[in-house]
Every structure is written in C-alpha cells, then in structure tokens.
Image (cartoon, rainbow, N blue to C red):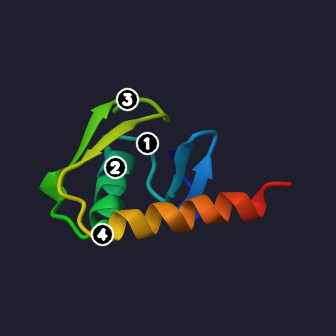
C-alpha cells in the first residue's frame, strides 16, 4: 500500500503482493478506509466483507475478502498478466 499517491488505484502484483496506491494520507485510518472501499468496489462486495487482518498500521497488509464473487479469478489473472508483461 502506498498512501499519499496522486490517485487511488491498483497497480498490480509487486514482490508477491498486490500494490495499491491510495490518494488518502495514512492519518487517522483514512488510507485504510480508502483501501477497504477500493477492494469492496473491485470485488463487488459490501464493505463489511473486507477486513484488514494484519498490518493495519503498516504498508504491508493482509486483507480478508469474504465471498469475493465471480470477479476475483478474472482480476487475479489480469494482474498476473500485467506482471508478466512488465517483467524484463
């Protein structure tokens, strides 16, 4: 997670994790709230289904998404393809 970015977006796999840029600052949980909102939208789940399991005050987080639905395999495949294309 990269707080304080110019825009909120998923940039794809990075070092075995998913890199996410967030426009919100890492103050008072604003970046975490943006992360939960972004992942809820991406996976088409209610915000209550997205939980930060570990790392709520760290850049590296473990996220649990309950019932991510049919979009999850397609999103993961797209991110993996993006990583392959950007690798030398």
At 18% from the left and 58% from the top, the residue drawn is 47
In terms of sequence position, does the residue under pointer 4 or pointer 2 come before the other? Answer: 2
Q: Nearer the viewer, mark 1 or mark 3?
A: 3
Residue closest to the eye, 7 or 38: 38
Q: Nearer the viewer, mark 1 or mark 4?
A: 4
Residue 71 is tagged as none
User: Is 45 displayed left or right of 15 in the figure?
Assistant: left
SS state under label 1? loop
SS state under label 2? helix
**Residues under numbered marks 1 and 2 in contact, where contact means CB atoms less than 8 Å apart:** yes
Q: Which residue is mark 1?
A: 26
Query: Which quadrant is home to the C terminus?
Result: bottom right
At 20% from the left and 65% from the top, the residue drawn is 45
Q: Which residue is mark 3?
A: 55
Q: Which residue is mark 4?
A: 41
Residue closest to the eye, 63 or 22: 63
In terms of sequence position, does the residue under pointer 1 or pointer 4 come before the other? Answer: 1
Q: CA distance from mark 3 to mark 4?
A: 21 Å
In terms of sequence position, does the residue under pointer 3 or pointer 2 come before the other? Answer: 2
Q: CA distance from mark 3 to mark 2?
A: 14 Å
């Amino acid at each position: 997670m990269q707080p304080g970015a110019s825009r909120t977006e998923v940039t794809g796999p990075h070092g075995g994790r998913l890199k996410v840029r967030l426009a919100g600052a890492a103050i008072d949980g604003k970046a975490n709230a943006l992360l939960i909102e972004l992942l809820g939208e991406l996976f088409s789940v209610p915000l209550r289904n997205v939980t930060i399991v570990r790392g709520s005050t760290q850049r590296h987080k473990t996220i649990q998404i309950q019932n991510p639905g049919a979009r999850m395999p397609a999103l993961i495949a797209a991110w993996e393809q993006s990583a392959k294309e950007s690798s030398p």
